[in-house]
Image (cartoon, helix red, strand yellow):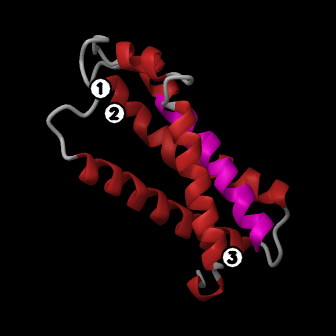
Amino acid sequence: MDFSSINPLGVLLAVLAGFAVNFVWFGPIGVFWIWWEAIGRSRDEQPGAGMNMGVVFGSTIASIVVEVIVLAAVLGGLYESPSVLQGIGLGVAVGVGVAAMPSLGHRLFSGQGFKVWLLEVGADIIGAGVMGAVLAAIG
């Protein structure tokens, strides 16, 4: 993988796009309450209670940055000049194969089941597809 050819503007925009997908997906207009109740929480409980939100959001953003950089390196390694469709395809493939599939066992063994898994990986798959599209579009 050649990291030197990665466009920093593409990385920045893809990170913002990935964060936006997760913000909408897990926001009040998305699946948050369905997911929240599926993991066994009540509507009275405060998300992240007792946790340092700087650490939570900082870790979330850092993980998206790493995902975008790796996705950009793989995209650049596979295609000299990827199309948006190729970016989406690779993003979705990575979302399904690298993010969604390994976490299935974690959700099942923890007793959270398929519903929680689908709600969580839905954002991963869509987010990776959008990030791949942004990376391909920006070049």
Q: Quadrant of the N terminus?
A: bottom right
Q: Callout 3: helix, strand or loop?
A: helix
Name the side, left or right, on which 45 lies relative to 85: left
Label 3 Cα crowd, 10 Å radius (few <14 / some 14-19 / many 20+): some
Depth check: 39 or 17 in front?
17
Give the magenta range. 120-139
The answer for how far apart the CA atoms under marks 1 and 2 are is: 5 Å
Q: How many marks?
A: 3
Quick check: marks 3 and 1 in contact, CB under 8 Å?
no
Which amino acid lies under the numbered mark 3 shown in the image of this protein? Gly
The answer to whether any part of residue 9 appears in the image is yes
| Residue shown at 19% from the left, 46% from the top | 52
Residue 109 is tagged as: 1
| Residue shown at 33% from the left, 33% from the top | 106
Residue 106 is tagged as: 2
The answer for how far apart the CA atoms under marks 2 and 3 are is: 31 Å
